[in-house]
Each structure stands twice: as structure tokens, then as C-alpha cells.
Amino acid sequence: MWEIIAANKRKSIILFSGMALCLVLLGYFIGAAIEPEHGGISGLFLALGIWAFLSIVSYFSGDKILLTVSGARKVTHDLHPQLFNVVEEMKIAANLPAMPDVYIIDEPAPNAFAIGIKPEKCAVAVTAGLLSRLNRDELQGVIAHEISHILNRDVQFMTFAGIMLGSIVLVSEIFLRWMWFAPGAGRRYRSRSSSKFGGDHWMIVVGAIALAILGPIFARLLYFAISRKREYLADASAVRLTRYPEGLASALEKIALSDVQLQTANKVTAPMYIVNPLTGKKAGLTGLTSTHPPIHERIMILRTMTRGADYLDYQRAFSKMKGKPTMIIPTSGLKQSKGIQIREGSIDKTAPADEKDAVRKAFDLMRAMNGYAFLVCACGLKIKLPPDFDKPELLCPRCGRTNHVPTAELAAVGAAAGVLTGVGGGETLEPAPAPRNDEAPLEYVRKGKGWETYFCSCGKRMQISPAFCATHMSCTTCGRITKIIDHTTQ
């Protein structure tokens, strides 16, 4: 694995150097065009200063900014145990030094991304729509792909490459807008060209304009080339971690076929996702201007892997898809191949039956994230209560039965909607007190297999997700243990 990271880094540094050269030349020519005598050096340092400033901001708070912009909320194990278990499994398989933070994006569209400059401080974010559509094997494939980005240092490199690209675009935009809108800019150039600087200055001006137009295009092509290759490598690493290519292939297929648009995605965050959320069904028509390889090619490669789940098997499948020997895995990585066998798929009963079921599960998860409580009537109807619901009783709209509503508990936690999930993009509540579990355990009988809500004796609202399969839950506020009893066993 370390040989793959080193080879990946060497090739990426070459492309990164090309972007840096573009930024230096752009700054120098723009500075010389504005002030011929000493402006070249000043422009060069100004361009590098912009890049340094953006890099510092990104290093210290870039992950928080991107998570907030994406509408991601940090969640706890209680909200979605299966997601946490899968992330922990992949963290162990990849030998990461620390457990990534887990975030859920309040969106019904299926997608996911990873963030973090260092493996010691990283995060994985998935949408509610992804969790509602994928079974365990598919979810494991997606998480393994994102963990691979962290392991291969893709997140770190693409962050700084993106900053370099942003700096080039910013410097170019400022210069071109100044040329167009600044009063008398053209007259100043003409007067300088006709005086002591002669015709040489016009050549510098033309060169600066050409670089301002072509520089961002060249830098984007380099950035896209880096990004596409790293997606292939992340797929290969994910298969090696899960030993099940079909899991990731099926997940990519479901994400690509979804008609739901990711509302929080933009041009800045789109390259981070496992599937470009801005292309939709046109993802298969991508080319030089795409941050992701064509989705149908990625799926085809994964489904061609029938002999094994190692780097060599992925390389063979990649060359077969391309129709000619094409290296995507570094030679040093191929030498690491150990003949990893493909495992059998697992049976997961939590996978949605159809699209309607998937949408319903997605919206239930989004309601749970936003502080809704789930009251299950004796007739089986699940009633969703908003955090500000203040009535002591509620009539079931199906059977007319009167259901008691724990309004005191709802009021206690209503002001902190999302006490289990965080209060906003990238924010979390204060740490809970140290748990105490010396009291006799409570009991709660589940009425179905969907989302349910019960309250601890301390008033803490506890959410039980459809994926919950343990025998008890511990309150993070008081430490009280509650036995969770399946109604089918009574």
C-alpha cells in the first residue's frame, strides 16, 4: 500500500508542478503588464501570496467549511449503528491511525465523500438517501472507496491542488475584469507603449491576456487528470479492502441511476463525491473536462473482476475494458498482489424493497436528524412528531386510538433538536457527562422494524433506527441501560 501511495504522489507532484508554473507565469506577466518596470516580481509574489493565504485557511478550517456548505451533520453511533460499524471495519482494514468522524448529509439524493488533510483527523460524510438505498455490502464498498481516498492521501493532495486551481482562476478573473471595467486602462497601456517602453510592452500585455484566458483552462485539465486517476485507484483499493467488487459496482449503479438531485452540491464540492452530483445521468458522457471517470467504465471494470480482488486483478480488468494494455496501477503496487480471493455477498434484510421504500427511509432518517420523534400506534402506523409538538395526546389517523405523547420529555429536548446528531453543519453539542450504569436497566419493546423513539428516565430522547440489531442501548447523558426487546419474541 505504501508503494502505491509513493508512486501516486510522485506522478501527482509532476502535475501539481505544472499548475504551480502556470500560477507563477500568470502572476509575473500580469504584474509586468500593469507595471512594466518592477511589476513582474510584485505580481509573482502577489499570486503566491493569494495561494499561501488560501492554503492556510484550508489547512486549519477547510474541512469545517466544506462540511457546513454541504449541510453535513456529525452523528453518533445510536442514530445509525450499521454506518458506524462499517466505517470502523474499513478503518481497521485500512489500518488508519484514528477513527474518522461520521457525518450524514440531510439530502435524499444518494452520494458520499471524504474530507481531511491528515489520516489522523478525517471524516466521512454520506447522504440520507445513500443509507436508505444501499444494503450492507454496497455501503461497505462506498465507505471503503472514501477510506481509500484518505489512505492514499488523495484528500490532502486534491485539496491543495484545488486551492492552486482556485488561485489561478481568481488571479485571472481579477486581471480580466480590471482590464474590462477599469476606467482608462486601455489608454494607460497605449500611452506606455508609445513612450519609453515601446512595442515590447504590448507583447507583455497580450501575453498576460492569453495566460489569463488559457491558464485556468490548462490548470483545470491538469486538475481533472489528477482527479480521474485517483478515482480509479480508490476503486481498486476499495475492492482490496472489502474483497467484494460487486458491492461497490452495485452501489455506483444505484447512485448513477437516481433521479434525485443533490441540492447542496456546487462546483467546489462536486469533485469530492464518489459520483459527480452535477452530471446526473450524463456522467457516462464525461471526457477531459470531468473530475470523475465515466461511471459505466468504473462499473464495467469492477464486474470484470472475477479471478480475485487484488491490484493485479483490477489492472487486468482495466486493460480489458480499455481494449489494450493500459497501466492504471503503478508497477510497485502490482508487485504487492497477494492473490486476494473474492468473498461471497452477505444477506442484508435492511435493504429497501423498491424506490418508494428507499425514499420513505431517507425521509425518516432526515426527520430523525432534525429532532422528530416516532410514535408507533398499536395498529402499526408510525406517527412523526415534530420537536415543537406540545399536546399530551394524539389521535391515530388510521384507527382513531388515543396515543399518549410524552410532552415533558419532548419539551426538554425540543430546544436542542438533533441532540443525538449535532445542531448544524459541522457542529456538535457539548460532550455528555460521564455515564453511570449502576441503575437497574429499563425495558422497551419494539413495535416494528422502522424508526422508533423512546425516552430515557432522565428525559433524553433515544432514536432506534431500522438497522439497529443490538439487545440494549446506553443513554449518553446518564448512562442508564435500556433493554431493547423485539416484539416478535414476546
Image (spheres, helix red, strand yellow):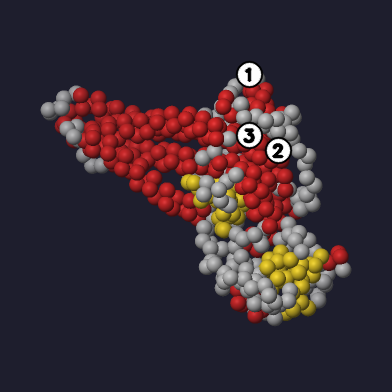
Number of other residues with Cα within 10 Å of mark 1, as a class: few under 14, some 14 to 19, many 20 or more: few
Q: CA distance from mark 3 to mark 1?
A: 19 Å
Residue 236, numbered label = 3
Q: Earlier in the sequence, mark 2 or mark 3?
A: 3
What residue did someone put label 1 on? 324
Decide if residue 257 is in sight here. Answer: no
Residue 243, numbered label = 2
Number of other residues with Cα within 10 Å of mark 3, as a class: few under 14, some 14 to 19, many 20 or more: many
Foreground: disc 2 or disc 3: 2
In the rendering, at what x and y percent does residue 374 appear? 71, 68
Report the front residue among 334 and 184: 334
Kindly identify the residue that appears in the image at 67 percent across and 58 percent down: 80
Q: CA distance from mark 2 to mark 1?
A: 25 Å
Residue 473, numbered label = none
In the rendering, at what x and y percent does residue 159 appear? 46, 42
Q: Earlier in the sequence, mark 3 or mark 1?
A: 3
Q: Earlier in the sequence, mark 2 or mark 1?
A: 2
> Disc 2 marks which amino acid?
Arg
Labels 2 and 3 touching (C-beta < 8 A): no
Kindly identify the residue that appears in the image at 86 percent across and 65 percent down: 489
> Disc 1 marks which amino acid?
Lys
Foreground: disc 2 or disc 1: 2
